[in-house]
Every structure is written in structure tokens, then in C-alpha cells.
Image (cartoon, helix red, strand yellow):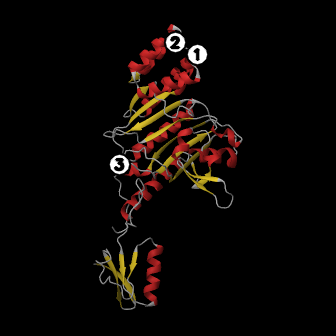
């Protein structure tokens, strides 16, 4: 069997010319949008020490990270699987402003396992993070920027699945769950296994009011008006739960007002990233897609290990996924064919045209390309007297 040296590893992709131009043009388009919102672009390195990459994002990221040994120091490096910790490091250690800091990024990440629907282990991660503000305004701004991003990419019928991790976290504390019990219950919530939850609560000696609220929690999902029902069902909950419900209701109302076409699904057991999120958490879906196309939430305190524990909220998505919906075609000049001629006037003409943004394909001596059509050109340079002029093919 002949070795297939051209084959790529599973889940690793490349972009050929047409797709590359689409990706690059969408990248520029999104960065231009983010700039109008005041978000500054940063470009963190592809590899960092593992201690930095794992900060505050939970154990799952460690499993997703490819690890290599630095031949200069012998220390373990990681190839980034998520850019969020890097952006937090930049905010906390490099920029050091006391004011709100808005940062955006687009770059490749590499993961040991795929969790996108297309099986990709090398997404082009797009994201925006807002540091230094802990209120509803910053959560709303980041969510609005995400929804604007998806609308600009022409994502059809966006559904936003939103929750608040402090509802379960505070209920678990009120019920007196041990760390192990909280972990067991969290696993059942993730699976939405109602029979297991009912049986577990029946067998666990918890106060009746708290047990009932925990039993009802996985049943509290649906349209935004569900939050009114949740306030009644969780009326005996502590002030932290009530504050989280009120916060969620206020935020959802603002989203509905500014983005009336966005479908909102409230799920009080939406707990993705539970080990590091500290407030709202959400995922966005497109019509016809069973998997999320974007994710975000609040994760205050992530910069603590870098010397500054800052409030933080942000989102991320995948540029390759967004290009599936983006129908805009970037204008491309007609390619102009230049013959293999050493005339200095031709070289000067080519330089002038390229400076104007024209695409010039210059024939090479002995090249197999004999005609403009061979080079995919719709125009050509022809000598007329002492000048080289453009003519249609």
C-alpha cells in the first residue's frame, strides 16, 4: 500500500483558495464591526505554558489541550484549545487598565477531540471579551454583539438558550448539599434525567422545601414568561436565587426589545462551564442545526492567577461555521494577463496597475500557460504603439 502523505489527521482541515478568501473577507468584516463597538483586536501566541492556558476554565480544557515539551526549558507547553484564558492574561497582566476593557480575537485553536457537529478539531475561534464591569450592561453588550455577529453572517432564525448558574449553585448551598452530592445532582441535571432526580431526592434526607425546589428545577425551561412561574416555584429560595432570577428576567427583556426576531429559550439548568462561569450562560443555535454555533457567559475572577481578578463576560464562535451562512461575495477584480515580455514599459504598467489593486497574472518564460484563459483571466495587456493597454479577452 502506498503511503498517503497527502492525508490530514482526522478533524484537521485546510482551506483552498475560494474558501480562504471567504474566510478572510468575513474575518475582516467582523473585525470592522467589533472596532465600531470599541473592541480592540489582540493576537495571543499559539503556545503557552500549561499553567496559563488552564487558568479558570476548568478541567475539561486540560483534556482538550495538546501538550508538548519546550526544548529550551524542559517545561510543558500547551497548544491553545481555547483563547479565552489568553485574553484574560492579556487584560490582567499586559494592559492593566482599571477601566472596562474590550478585546476581540480571531485565530486557530487545536483540540484533542472534536465537539463541533462537523468533527473539526481545528476551529477558527472568533470571540469578544469585556473585562472590568460586573453589571447587566456588560452582559447585555456582549450578548448584543454576539447576536449582531450572527445577523451579519445571515444565520437563519437564531435561538438563544440562556440560564444563570447561580440559581442551581445557590439552591445547592441552601439545601446543604456536599460537594459530592452537588456533583451527582449536577450530572443528573445535565442529562435531564427526571426519574433519577426524583429517586435520588426521595432517598436523600433534605429539607422538604429545598428538595421540592431541586425537583422542580429541571422542569423549569421554556419561553421567557417561564421566569414568572420560576419565581413562584422558587419562592422559598434564598436571596441569591431571587437576585439571579430577577437579573435573568431583566436581561431577557432587554434582548427581546432590541432583537425581537431572536427566539429566546430559558433553561434554569443550562449549566455549561459550571465550574468557571459565575453568572449568565448561553448558547446560540441556528434553524436546522442541532448543535450550538456560539457560546458565552460571565466568568468573573478569571484573572486572579495573573494578579488581577477582574469581572469578565464574553462569547466565542467558529469562523468556519459562520461562513456556511454568509452569502456575501467579496468583490474581486478581473484578473489581467500579462505576457512574458521584458519590455520595461510593461513592468512599469504592471506596477501601476497592482498599486491600484488590480490583479495581474504575469506569464512565465517556458510556462504551460499560453493564453489568458489558461490563467483564468478575463482581460489582457496588449502593446499598442509604445503603450500597454488593457483589452477584454
Question: Residue 373: image x %, image y %?
Answer: 28, 77
In the visual, does 135 lie left or right of 306?
left
* Any part of residue 253 in sight: no
Q: As drawn, which residue projects farthest toward the right? A: 307
Distance (Cα) linking label 3 and label 1: 47 Å
Q: Residues within 10 Å of mark 3 (few under 14, many from 20)?
A: some
Q: CA distance from mark 2 to mark 3?
A: 45 Å
Q: Which residue is mark 1?
A: 176
Q: Are marks 2 and 1 in contact (CB under 8 Å)?
A: yes
Q: Which residue is mark 2?
A: 210
Percent x, y for residue 344? 46, 89
Q: Is residue 212 above or below residue 41?
A: above
In this rendering, the label closer to the viewer, 3 or 1? 1
Q: Nearer the viewer, mark 2 or mark 1?
A: 1
| Marked residue nearer the N-terminal end (2 or 1) | 1
Q: Which residue is mark 3?
A: 325
Secondary structure under tag 2 reads helix
Please name the residue shown 42% across and 15% down the image.
199
Quarter holding the C terminus is bottom left
Q: Give the vertical position of 327 relative to 303 (above or below).
A: below
Q: Residues within 10 Å of mark 1 (few under 14, many from 20)?
A: some
Rendering coords of residue 324 (x, y %): 35, 50
Could you give the CA–CA distance between mark 2 and mark 1, rounded to whole angstroms? 9 Å
Nearer to me, 324 or 356? 324
Would residue 65 appear left or right of 216 to someone viewing this image? right
Amino acid at each position: 500500500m502506498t503511503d498517503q502523505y497527502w492525508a490530514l489527521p482526522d478533524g484537521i482541515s485546510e482551506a483552498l483558495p475560494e474558501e480562504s478568501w471567504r474566510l478572510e473577507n468575513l474575518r475582516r468584516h467582523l473585525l470592522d464591526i467589533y472596532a465600531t463597538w470599541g473592541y480592540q483586536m489582540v493576537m495571543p501566541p499559539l503556545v503557552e505554558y500549561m499553567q496559563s492556558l488552564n487558568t479558570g476554565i476548568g478541567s475539561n480544557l486540560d483534556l482538550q489541550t495538546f501538550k508538548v515539551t519546550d526544548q529550551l526549558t524542559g517545561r510543558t507547553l500547551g497548544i491553545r484549545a481555547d483563547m479565552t484564558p489568553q485574553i484574560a492574561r492579556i487584560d490582567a497582566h499586559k494592559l492593566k487598565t482599571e477601566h472596562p476593557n474590550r478585546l476581540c480575537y480571531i485565530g486557530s485553536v487545536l483540540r484533542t477531540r472534536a465537539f463541533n457537529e462537523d468533527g473539526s478539531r481545528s476551529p477558527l475561534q472568533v470571540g469578544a471579551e469585556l473585562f472590568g464591569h460586573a453589571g447587566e450592561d456588560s452582559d447585555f453588550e456582549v450578548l448584543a454583539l454576539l447576536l449582531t455577529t450572527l445577523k451579519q453572517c445571515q444565520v437563519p432564525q437564531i435561538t438563544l438558550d440562556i440560564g444563570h448558574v447561580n440559581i442551581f449553585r445557590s439552591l445547592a448551598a441552601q439545601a446543604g448539599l456536599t460537594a459530592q452530592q452537588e456533583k451527582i445532582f449536577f450530572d443528573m441535571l445535565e442529562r435531564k434525567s427526571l426519574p433519577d432526580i426524583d429517586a435520588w431526592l426521595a432517598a436523600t434526607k433534605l429539607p422538604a422545601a429545598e428538595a421540592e425546589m431541586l425537583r422542580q428545577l429541571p422542569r423549569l425551561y421554556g419561553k421567557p414568561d417561564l421566569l414568572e412561574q420560576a419565581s413562584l416555584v422558587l419562592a422559598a429560595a434564598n436571596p441569591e436565587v431571587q437576585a439571579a432570577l430577577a437579573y435573568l428576567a431583566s436581561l431577557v427583556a432587554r434582548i427581546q426589545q432590541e432583537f425581537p426576531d431572536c427566539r429566546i429559550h430559558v433553561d434554569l439548568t443550562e449549566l455549561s462551564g459550571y465550574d468557571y462561569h459565575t453568572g449568565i450562560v448561553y448558547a446560540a443555535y441556528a434553524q436546522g442545526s442541532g448543535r450550538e454555533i456560539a457560546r458565552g457567559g460571565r466568568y468573573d475572577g478569571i484573572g486572579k492567577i495573573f494578579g488581577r481578578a477582574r469581572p469578565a463576560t464574553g462569547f466565542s464562535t467558529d469562523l468556519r461555521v459562520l461562513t456556511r451562512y454568509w452569502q456575501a461575495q467579496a468583490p474581486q477584480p478581473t484578473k489581467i494577463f500579462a505576457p512574458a515580455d521584458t519590455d520595461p514599459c510593461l513592468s512599469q504598467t504592471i506596477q501601476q496597475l497592482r498599486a491600484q489593486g488590480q490583479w495581474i497574472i504575469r506569464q512565465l518564460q517556458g510556462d504551460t500557460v499560453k493564453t489568458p484563459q489558461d490563467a483564468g483571466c478575463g482581460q489582457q495587456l496588449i502593446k499598442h504603439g509604445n503603450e500597454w493597454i488593457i483589452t477584454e479577452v
